[in-house]
Amino acid sequence: MRALVVGGGIAGPATAMALQAIGMDAVILEARPAGGDGAGSWFTISPNGLAALDALGALGAVRELGVPSRHNVMAGATGRRLGVLPLGSPLADGTPALSFKRSELAAALRDEARDRGVEVRDDARVVAVHGTGEDASVTLADGRRLTGDLVIGADGIHSVVRAAIDPGTPRGRYVGLANFGGVTRGPATADSLPAESWYFVFGRRAFFGALPTPDGDVVWFVNVPRDAISQTERAATSDERWREILVDLAEADDGPFAGLIGDGRLELAADNTYDLPSVPVWHRGRVGLVGDAIHAPAPSSGQGASMALEDAVVMAASLAGSGDVEAGFVAFESARRARVEKIVALGARSSSAKTPTGLARMLNDAVMTLVFRYLVTERSQAWIFDHRVRLDPADRVRP
Ligand SMILES: Cc1cc2nc3c(=O)[nH]c(=O)nc-3n(C[C@H](O)[C@H](O)[C@H](O)COP(=O)(O)OP(=O)(O)OC[C@H]3O[C@@H](n4cnc5c(N)ncnc54)[C@H](O)[C@@H]3O)c2cc1C
């Protein structure tokens, strides 16, 4: 059987490798040209996502790119510590949660898939999808048509595959935060940050995060509560100007961020953040979906990429365990819907805690300390981090 996987981000390569493991041929169609400038944001893959990579035998190929991120350490605008949230128990081999530059992890996963014999086509934008008959096909922007036995959309929150399955499908919802990210080379404040941890500050005018890397640099991001940034505003604002605005926001608080941003380089500017709470139709005929294309949580959840990796494994196991493609998609949905929608809802609550009308901004530091001591705890989050997906070596799809 031949699967056409649309999207070569996180879910796409992982799904292609998982399908290959159950005996399918998989082709990845990625809209972007090969290469890229390596810019973009960082994210964390928690143990549940790392375990999914491990189930695909792909963790070893990417582990060295990751920066250990054992805890989220939360502080208020005065620098007062509000709480520490462990990011799950390490895997059995000791691997803790790892943070990656998103573009580097995606490229490494594509390389790994390619090394395993998966065909990866760059510069292959899918513009139309067909798949209710005996086979499934896609049309590329250059007019070529490719045919397979099934199509899986791993094409992110603005998925064309989702829209092809259901023209009335919901669109991404702006969560009220614009995102910026950057890196500062060898700052003096690196040593003052908690080691192998993200340091988060609920600032007076924005939410900040920083992660020290093993080579002495600091990766950081800023979530700015505001209206979505228009194309016009983006085009009219230089990186230098954004940095001045961010420094100004950070100067309202105590802590390292004004200095880090002032001395750093912006790698992600003016990115509006979206989520996708509940998608009514997950599949139609021989066309299905994985990753952000069906359940994008707000970035604040810290789970989008981990869920995308879990999806890849569960999709392959569901297809292998079912009599046909459609039954496989039904099994996948019933295995995944409740979990992913619960995580998306949690992400929406985390985002609203960062916006000016949000709960966190109205509460004082003392109450926030209680929240992190009693409500948002290692125990209360265990259902997220301790979840494990598996692919049985005997799982094979019927030819
Ligand atoms: C700022 C930010 C911070 C985040 N932090 C975290 C975090 O800490 N932890 C976490 O787990 N998640 C995090 N996430 C979420 C995470 O990035 C996503 O959940 C994850 O990337 C989803 O993977 P995906 O493969 O489904 O989608 P994507 O990564 O969006 O990949 C989709 C791919 O499809 C391609 N594509 C799109 N349309 C087409 C088309 N028509 N034809 C062909 N190809 C197409 C795109 O070019 C892209 O390569 C964050 C997201 C953002 C924006």
Image (cartoon, helix red, strand yellow):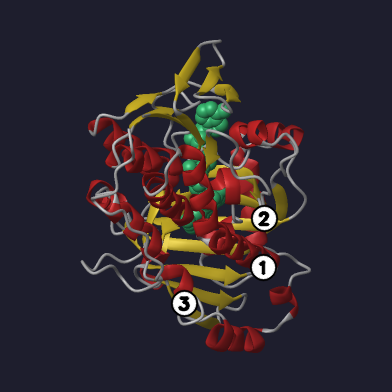
Q: Are marks 3 and 2 in contact (CB under 8 Å)?
A: no
Please tell me the numbered disc located at residue 186: none
Q: Amino acid at mark 1?
A: Arg
Q: Is mark 2 within 8 Å of ligand 1?
A: no
Closer to the chain start, of discs 3 and 1, is 3
Which quarter shows the C terminus? Answer: top left
Residue identified by numbered label 2: 277
Residue at 77% over, 50% down: 227
Q: CA distance from mark 1 to mark 2?
A: 12 Å
Amino acid type, mark 2: Pro
Q: Nearer the observer, disc 3 or disc 1?
A: 1
Residue 38: percent from left, percent from top: 42, 36
Q: Position of residue 349 (x, y in %)?
A: 67, 68
Q: Is residue 4 left or right of residue 296?
A: left
Q: How crowded is the residue under tag 2: few (<14 C-alpha within 10 Å), some, or many (20+)?
A: many
Badge 1, how many Cα within 10 Å: few under 14, some, many 20+?
Answer: some
Q: Is residue 385 above or below residue 12?
A: below
Q: Position of residue 235 (x, y in %)?
A: 69, 31
Q: CA distance from mark 3 to mark 1?
A: 16 Å
SS class of the residue under badge 2? loop
Q: Which residue is mark 1?
A: 349
Q: Nearer the viewer, residue 125 or 138?
A: 138
Give the residue at x 62% y 57%: 223
Residue type marked 3: Leu
